[in-house]
């Protein structure tokens, strides 16, 4: 979906600067500001819970889920959640824990 929106923005920008205005500096400056903002804020986004589960970083996983829950206004019941290394007991009939739909 995002690729379609980005493509439409690029098409709009191309047509705008071809036919309406030749003052492209503001548009480039806005893009630069958004890129710098993205590069700076990426350090505050927690790791993916799926990645943390696959790498067995359970404490970091709890911290990431807590942060995501706070952002979403959700309280997690830590007594109901258990994170342990269950890869030894998985068989082919059981769903794999690395699938996003099977994480929680």
Image (tube, rainbow, N blue to C red):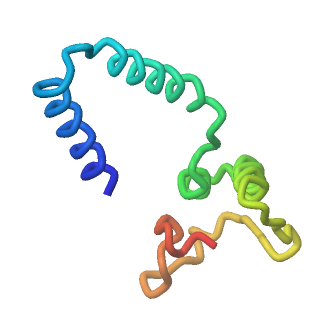
Q: Position of residue 45 (x, y in %)?
A: 62, 39
Q: Is residue 21 above or below residue 8?
A: above
Q: Position of residue 55 (x, y in %)?
A: 57, 50
Q: Residue furthest left?
A: 18
Q: Is residue 79 above or below residue 71?
A: below
Q: Residue furthest right?
A: 79
Q: Is residue 79 above or below residue 2?
A: below
Foreground of the two, 43 or 8: 8
Total numbered labels placed on residues in the image: 0
Horizontal arrangement in the rendering, residue 42 relative to residue 72 (left or right): left
Residue name at image x 70 percent, y 54 percent: 68
Residue name at image x 77 percent, y 70 percent: 82
Question: Where's the N terminus, which quadrant?
Answer: bottom left
Quarter of the image where one finds residue 20:
top left
Horizontal arrangement in the rendering, residue 91 relative to residue 77 (left or right): left
Question: Where's the C terminus, which quadrant?
Answer: bottom right
Residue name at image x 27 percent, y 49 percent: 3
Foreground of the two, 54 or 87: 54
Foreground of the two, 104 or 75: 75
Residue name at image x 31 percent, y 12 percent: 25
């Amino acid at each position: 979906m995002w690729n379609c929106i980005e493509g439409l923005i690029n098409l709009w920008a191309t047509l705008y600067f071809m036919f309406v205005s030749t003052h492209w500096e503001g548009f480039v400056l806005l893009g630069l500001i958004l890129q710098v903002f993205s590069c700076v804020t990426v350090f505050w986004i927690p790791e993916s819970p799926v990645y943390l589960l696959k790498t067995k970083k359970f404490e970091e996983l709890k911290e990431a889920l807590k942060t995501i829950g706070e952002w979403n206004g959700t309280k997690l019941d830590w007594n109901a959640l258990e994170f342990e290394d269950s890869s030894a007991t998985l068989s082919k009939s059981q769903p794999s824990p690395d699938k996003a739909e099977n994480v929680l």
